Image: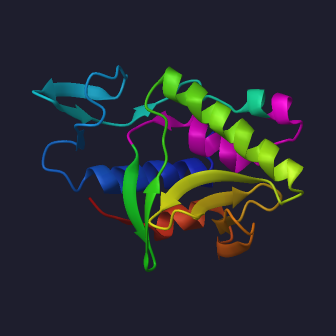
């Protein structure tokens, strides 16, 4: 089933990839295997998003941390493998986080377990990070309780609502390269 979140993620990915004459390219991802790779030229990898069928899920995180993750989190990370994508939300530059391959997905799961465990210890609202920002002390995340997309201050735990849900957040992103 194509949920609004999945449609919006694929839509943003398409908008982002369409900025390139050929395909998105990265030197950072050179020599790292991925089903996303279209071709390699010298030290540059050209890639496209790779839809995961069946989709992946984050159930291992739920089991380890002992919480149920918002369905949008499963869709965001389980729909596709891709390179990270730069974007702008209103006046804020961000880097949308994506898994590149199975190993990267496992690393992402471990990082999310650490993030959620720390939040639990600090008695904070559980969030699932989806993007980094230019500010080292803030991330863009899903509020796990409400599904809202928030700016999270990692020091204070303060959450500022950016969008009521993941689909509307992704639809409002401006793709930049």
**Looking at the image, is 114 positioned above or below residue 124?**
above
Instruction: Note whether residue 159 is visible.
Output: yes
Q: Would residue 75 be counted in the magenta stretch?
A: yes
Residue at point 63%, 48% (across, down): 3
Residue at the bottom extreme? 91
Image-quadrant location for residue 24: top left
Q: Is residue 63 left or right of residue 26?
A: right
Q: Which residues are magenta?
A: 62-83
Display coloring: rainbow
Q: How many circles with numbers are drawn on the protein?
A: 0
Name the one closer to the observer, 107 or 71: 107
Horizontal placement of 100 versus 54: left or right?
A: left
Residue 42 is situated, as x and y percent measured from the top left of the image, at 9, 27
Residue shown at the point (66%, 66%) measured from the top left: 152
| Camera sees residue 2 | no
Looking at the picture, how far across and down is residue 107, in whole percent?
A: 57, 29
65 on left or right of 34: right
Q: Is residue 15 magenta?
A: no
Quadrant in which residue 91 is drawn: bottom left
**Image quadrant containing the C terminus:** bottom left
Residue at 18% across, 51% down: 20
The N terminus: image quadrant: top right
Please tell me which residue is depicted at 33% across the width and 57% down the height of the picture.
15
Q: Position of residue 106 (x, y in %)?
A: 59, 25
Q: Nearer the viewer, residue 108 or 118?
A: 118
The correct choice, above or below, for 36 with respect to 16 in the image is: above
């Amino acid at each position: 089933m194509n949920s609004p979140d999945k449609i919006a993620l694929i839509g943003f990915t398409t908008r982002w990839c369409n900025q390139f004459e050929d395909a998105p390219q990265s030197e950072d991802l050179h020599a790292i295997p991925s089903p996303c790779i279209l071709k390699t030229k010298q030290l540059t990898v050209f890639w496209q998003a790779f839809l995961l069928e069946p989709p992946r899920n984050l159930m291992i995180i739920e089991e380890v941390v002992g919480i149920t993750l918002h369905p949008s989190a499963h869709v965001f990370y389980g729909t596709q493998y891709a390179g990270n994508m730069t974007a702008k939300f209103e006046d804020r530059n961000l880097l949308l986080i994506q898994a590149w391959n199975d190993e990267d997905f496992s690393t992402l799961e471990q990082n999310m377990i650490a993030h959620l465990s720390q939040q639990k210890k600090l008695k904070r609202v559980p969030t699932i990070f989806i993007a980094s920002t230019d500010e080292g002390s803030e991330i863009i995340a899903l509020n796990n309780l409400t599904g809202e997309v928030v700016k999270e201050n990692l020091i204070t735990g303060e959450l500022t609502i950016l969008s009521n849900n993941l689909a509307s957040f992704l639809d409002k992103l401006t793709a930049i390269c």
